[in-house]
């Protein structure tokens, strides 16, 4: 049905955000195109079929999709390696200005830095607050001690140290 050329090869390239596969050695030659955003979490696999070897793509929460069917496992493997090579070359050649995914990746780093700064400030305020709270409970202020001493000595002479007190005055409060 289709004539195969002896020097035909499978090619894969990335162009303007699309993965483009040209599978000339498949049983049915095909040109296949996929958005890179959709391929971000997808995996490419070679699966053995009844009538040959299939190059497939499996995306999360989606069914297995056959890209091309090959008579020889080596042809399917060559196609898989061309996909891998194209994706690796795209990852090495991409710059932050060209792709939107790199811009999105830069934003969480800034957010993470801001979140760390906020957490550090809150933790520092918490530690300082705990320090002042315990410092106030461990060491009472001098003014409070003097106020308590003056009020006690002025109101009840029986509570002063060194002054004789009768038993009736001592037991009056009970």
Image: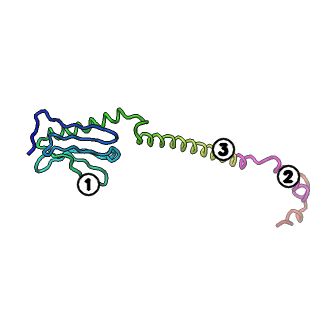
Residue 69 coordinates in the image, percent (x, y):
15, 46
Relative to 60, is 137 on the left or the right?
A: right
From the viewer's perspective, is the residue at label 2 or at label 1 nearer?
A: 1
Q: Main secondary structure of the magenta part?
A: helix
Q: In this rendering, which labeled residue sits more in front, label 3 or label 2?
A: 3
**Picture coordinates of residue 137, whole percent (x, y):** 71, 50
Of the pair 155 and 100, the residue shown nearer to us: 100
Residue drawn where x is 89% and y is 55% of the image: 153
Q: CA distance from mark 2 to mark 1?
A: 81 Å
Asked if residue 136 is among those painted magenta in the image, a careful observer would answer: yes
- Disc 1 crowd rating (10 Å Cα; few below 14, some 14-19, many 20+) is few
**SS under mark 1:** loop
Choose the circle earlier in sequence order: 2 or 1: 1
The residue indicated by pointer 3 is 128
Identify the secondary structure beneath mark 3: helix
Give how far apart the Cα atoms at labels 1 and 3 are: 56 Å
Q: What residue is shown with label 1?
A: 63
CB within 8 Å, label 3 to label 2: no
Q: Quadrant of the C terminus?
A: bottom right
Whether residue 107 is in magenta: the answer is: no
User: In the displayed structure, does residue 105 sit left or right of residue 160?
Assistant: left
């Amino acid at each position: 049905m289709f004539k195969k050329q002896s020097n035909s090869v499978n090619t894969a390239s990335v162009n303007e955000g699309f993965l483009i596969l040209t599978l000339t050695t498949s049983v049915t030659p095909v040109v296949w195109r996929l958005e890179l955003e959709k391929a971000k979490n997808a995996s490419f696999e070679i699966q053995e079929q009844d009538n040959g070897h299939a190059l497939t793509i499996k995306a999360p929460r989606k069914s297995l999709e056959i890209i091309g069917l090959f008579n020889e496992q080596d042809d399917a493997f060559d196609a898989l390696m061309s996909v891998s090579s194209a994706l690796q070359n795209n990852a090495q050649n991409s710059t932050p200005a060209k792709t939107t995914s790199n811009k999105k990746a830069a934003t969480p780093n800034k957010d993470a830095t801001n979140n760390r700064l906020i957490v550090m400030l809150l933790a520092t305020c918490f530690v300082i607050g705990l320090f002042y709270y315990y410092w106030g409970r461990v060491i009472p202020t001098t003014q409070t001690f003097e106020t308590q001493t003056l009020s006690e000595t002025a109101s009840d002479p029986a509570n002063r140290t060194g002054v004789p007190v009768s038993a009736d005055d001592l037991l009056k409060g009970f």
